[in-house]
Amino acid sequence: MTKIYSWNVNGIRAVTKKGTLQSLVHTHRPDILCLQETKAERGQADIDVNGYHEYWNSAEKKGYSGTAIFTRPEPLSVANGFSSTIARKYEFTDDAGRDSLGEGRVISAEFPEFYLVTVYTPNAKDDLSRLELRHKHWDPAFLAHCQQLEKKKPVVFCGDLNVAHTELDLANPGPNRGKKGFTDEEREGFQNFIDAGFIDVFRLFKQGKGHYTWWSHFANSRARNVGWRIDYVLVSSSLRKAVKAAEIHPDILGSDHCPVSITLAL
């Protein structure tokens, strides 16, 4: 069995200082742990990860964005970002001059049975200033990246996708329709993953509302479970039978997101 965990830590230095990341590693013992929004470079966080290989993709801007993978099995290969073919095809700089390619948002690791990709998808922003980037460039580029890998072997991708796919994936869909994370464009971007054959594995096990991975800091939202499901694990359709469990872990604190995980019989 292979246990894969994914967590937007909203600053790896903060969760290591609180001890919550170490607790997750020691208690749940994931085979592969993917982190988003690390906001740090390797060596800046004092974390005990004995037995894990570390791979980081840090943003050029200090203390911003970033991803990391900690894995017990050593990957056959690891690559940051997109291939040059995809990087040339799409435009990753938004109207404000922010280049999402330099924000450390994607790491891909190759293992014998599958590719693992972790992603921290750009936020559309309150003013939707990054919505066009998301809709026309980032989401299509990320899908193309996963499909490119899938030509060689099955793909598992996980991370903070910064979108609630359906009305079941947020507590208050009505007042949030058209706002960041729940625009038609962002939801379409997610649906394109599904239409391409990728499986939102959590929904193989649990349906309905109330299953969230992110909560606002305002109005005691987490305690009241007024949240959004924006952190996911998706797999190639050929891996469907290998998925034995998919969980959300709201009891793990330390970030405004909680971890998600899957167990593969591989």
Image: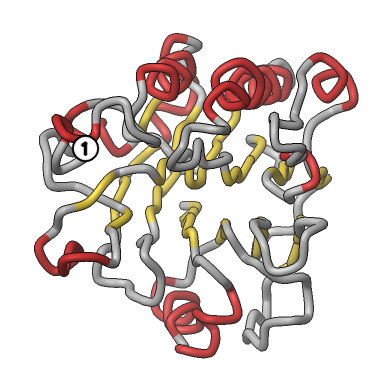
**Number of numbered discs visible in the structure rendering:** 1
Residue 129 left/right relative to 213 = right
Where does the image place residue 79, in percent across and percent down from the top left? 82, 43
Q: State the colouring used for the structure image.
A: secondary structure
Crowd band around label 1 with a 10 angstrom C-alpha radius: few (<14), some (14–19), many (20+): few
Using the image as rendered, state which of residue 157 and residue 138 is in the foreground: 138
Q: Secondary structure at mark 1?
A: helix
Residue drawn at the location 59% of the way across and 30% of the way down: 155
Is 83 placed above or below 148 here? below
Residue 100 left/right relative to 160 = right
Residue drawn at the location 71% of the way across and 15% of the way down: 151
Residue drawn at the location 50% of the way across and 36% of the way down: 124
Where does the image place residue 266, in percent across and percent down from the top left? 52, 43
The answer to whether residue 153 shows anywhere in this view is no
Residue 166 left/right relative to 4 = left
Where does the image place residue 246, in percent across and percent down from the top left? 32, 46
The answer to whether residue 202 shows anywhere in this view is yes
Is 222 placed above or below 157 here? below
Is 234 placed above or below 89 here? below
Using the image as rendered, state which of residue 59 and residue 34 is in the foreground: 59
View extreme (top): residue: 195
Residue drawn at the location 46% of the way across and 56% of the way down: 3
Where does the image place residue 248, in percent across and percent down from the top left? 29, 54
* Mark 1, residue position: 205
Using the image as rendered, state which of residue 137 and residue 19 is in the foreground: 137
Residue 180 left/right relative to 248 = right
Amino acid bearing label 1: Phe
Is 215 placed above or below 187 here? below
Using the image as rendered, state which of residue 240 and residue 219 is in the foreground: 219
Locate residue 66: give its quadrant.
Answer: bottom right
